[in-house]
Image (cartoon, rainbow, N blue to C red):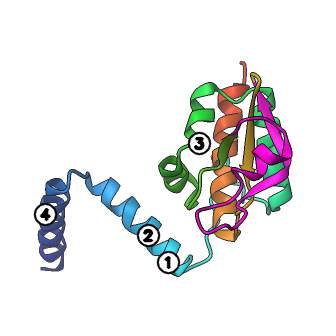
Amino acid sequence: MELNIEQDLLNEATQLFSKLGLTTEQAIRIFLIKSISSNGMPFPMVIDDQDGSKTPYITNNQITDTLLVLVEQGLPESELLNLQNSDYCKDVFALSFAVLKHAKSNQQADIKAVVQDVKGHNRYSTKKVARHNGQYYVICTQWTDRHRALFTHWHNQIQRKISPVSC
């Protein structure tokens, strides 16, 4: 009987999601992101990498330095664009901000013009500015514990794309 109730609820939810133009997976992802954004992570979360190892703790400074190196030394253009998209960053990292923002130059006035959010809070580094193909990017500094494992998981995937293991 319990299985029928769950299946009925799933069918009703699927119809509702369909009316909204969403797959069930998209709706669940949106629900989780919104729930975590407003309430925080309800339980400790560690993402295991493919080899089963636990994600090591990474500091904000290490994340910023890693992104700086990636942008300057080989991040694919498609991923560079993705990291400037706040929806992508919300889906991948559960961040409320784009990971990268374009700056006109590396001059302090141009950097200061883009590091703040609409409320005037600094969300990006003013000291570490990445340069890629003559373009400048400021890097988000708003990483909390709930973002670290997601960043590490993303970084591992990017590393495999950039430098695939040869057999």
Tell me if mark 1 has few (under 14), some (14-19) or many (20+) residues whose alpha carbon lies within 10 angstroms of its own.
few
Q: Count of labels shown?
A: 4
Crowding near the residue tagged with mark 4, few <14, some 14–19, many ≥20 C-alpha atoms within 10 Å: few
SS at mark 2 in the image = helix
Q: Amino acid at mark 1?
A: Ser
Question: Which of the numbered marks, if any, corresponds to residue 34?
Answer: 2
Q: Residue at x 73, y 25 (%)?
A: 163
Of residue 27 and residue 157, the one placed in the foreground of this image is 27
Tell me the mark number nearer the camera, choosing from 3 and 2: 3
Give me the C-alpha separation between circle 3 and circle 1: 23 Å
Compare residues 119 and 10 and report the one nearer the observer: 119
Q: Which residue is mark 3?
A: 84
Q: Amino acid at mark 2?
A: Lys
- Residue 105, image x, y percentages: 78, 35
Residue assigned mark 1: 38
Which mark is first along the chain, 2 or 3?
2
Q: Is residue 55 above or below residue 79?
A: below
Q: Are marks 2 and 1 in contact (CB under 8 Å)?
A: yes
> Mark 4 sits on what residue?
11
Decide which of tag 3 and tag 4 comes sooner along the chain: 4
- Which residue is nearer to you in this view: 97 or 54? 97
